[in-house]
Image (spheres, grey):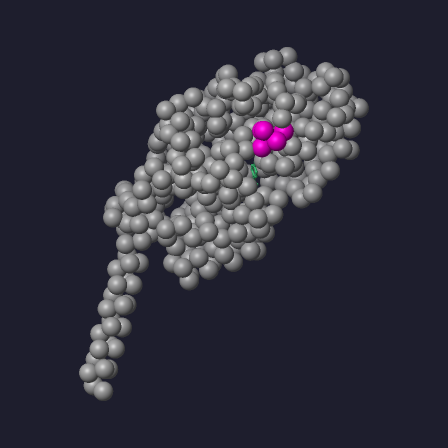
Amino acid sequence: MQRTFTRTLLVGLLASLSFATGAQNTIKVGVIAEFSGPFAAYGQQIEAGMKAYLKQHGDTVAGKKIELITRDTGGPAPEVAKRFAQELITRDKVQFLAGFGLTPNAMAVAPVVTEAKVPMIISNAATSVITTRSPYIARVSMTIPQVSAPMAQWALKNGVKQVYTVVADYGPGIDAETQFTKTFKAGGGEVVGTLRTPLQNPDFSAAIQRVKDAKPQAVFVFLPAGEQGIAFVKGFNERGLAKEGIKLIATGDITDDHVLDAMGDPTLGLITSFHYSAAHESAENATFLKNYAAANDAKVGRANFMAAAGYDTMAAIFEVVRKTNGDVDGDKAMAALKGYKWMSPRGPVMIDPDTRDIVQTVYIRKVEKKDGKLANVEFDKIVDVKDPGK
Ligand code: PHB
């Protein structure tokens, strides 16, 4: 009896010891994103990019194994995102939160990470204000004002003086409209009309007809990447706006590399401003794309800016674990991230030590056929662009 008891105690002790050692040797990353519903590609692309990084670098850094724990918000669902964040922190004891395709999901989690002092790396959500909502947030993707101002500058330089704006009616859309208008007006341009379309289930036919009736020189568009861009470009072509001489200009969300093939040849010639193109020519991008293909099922489709940001999210996490020698806490993590510079698949980037937002090159691109496939081909750029929205 006594012996059995002692043995049970010993086994129990050993089990808890090995559990503790296991926990100490693991860094858990809670990935909250959209893996189902109309925005499912966001979570899938972010995770595919993270896996590409782990494929290339292995899953261990400073003696710690990096473990991803994914949670699906199913779309824009702030309350769900918040609950996942709380559970991941208190129950799963994650040392990082990451992911966040959509702004409302990222915004809802900001107070949770402030309270818990857990570092949160944003892999997409791009409304300017997000990083101001917690000192524990850093962003490796982009901000919408950062990619919108260059489009206004390009339009002005190329003789476009009157623009109609059409944006999705939530954070990033309002940021795009605000920054584009500000830069465009400052350069002598005129905004002749503005329209906002709902984030969920928009029908673009009325908006496109109104733009056509107003006959502006161009329409500037921000829509969240994916299905909406496909629908807008289709409507733009069907209603013959290009034939009326109306140009379509936009942030690169609309010619998302992931859905470019589905949009087809009507995208040829479209000009957009953005921080990442799968057609970017660099050794780092080639390495990223090779590992993306090796780490993921072909079903995940062509890599886009969210996949590149997922890859960079892991680069940032590895840097923190390396710099802290695996002893990660919120304050040490943020100190390690501030001013961190690296060579991303998109080009040179840095986390701004003041804003914790990314500083990067913004490219002007045109959709062309490259090696027989539609691609966003970069032809102009502005280097070291900070978020002008702050
Ligand atoms: C966002 O919700 O912040 C968001 C979503 C899709 C994009 C860009 C920004 O393409």
Residue 351, how many percent across, how many down?
Answer: 39, 35
Residue 329, how many percent across, how many down?
Answer: 33, 51
Residue 126 can be seen in this image? yes
Viewer-side residue, 203 vs 185: 203
What residue is at 54 percent from the left and 23 percent from the top?
373
Vertically, is 306 above or below 114? above
What residue is at 49 percent from the left and 53 percent from the top?
71
Residue 8, how many percent across, how many down?
Answer: 25, 77
Viewer-side residue, 302 vs 254: 302
Residue 193 left/right relative to 136: right
Residue 121 falls within the magenta-colored stretch: no
Furthest-left residue in view? 3
Viewer-side residue, 191 vs 54: 54
Q: Quadrant of ligand 1?
A: top right
Looking at the rendered image, the quarter that the N terminus falls into is bottom left
Magenta residues span 259-263
Predominant SS along the magenta part: helix
Residue 331 left/right relative to 194: left
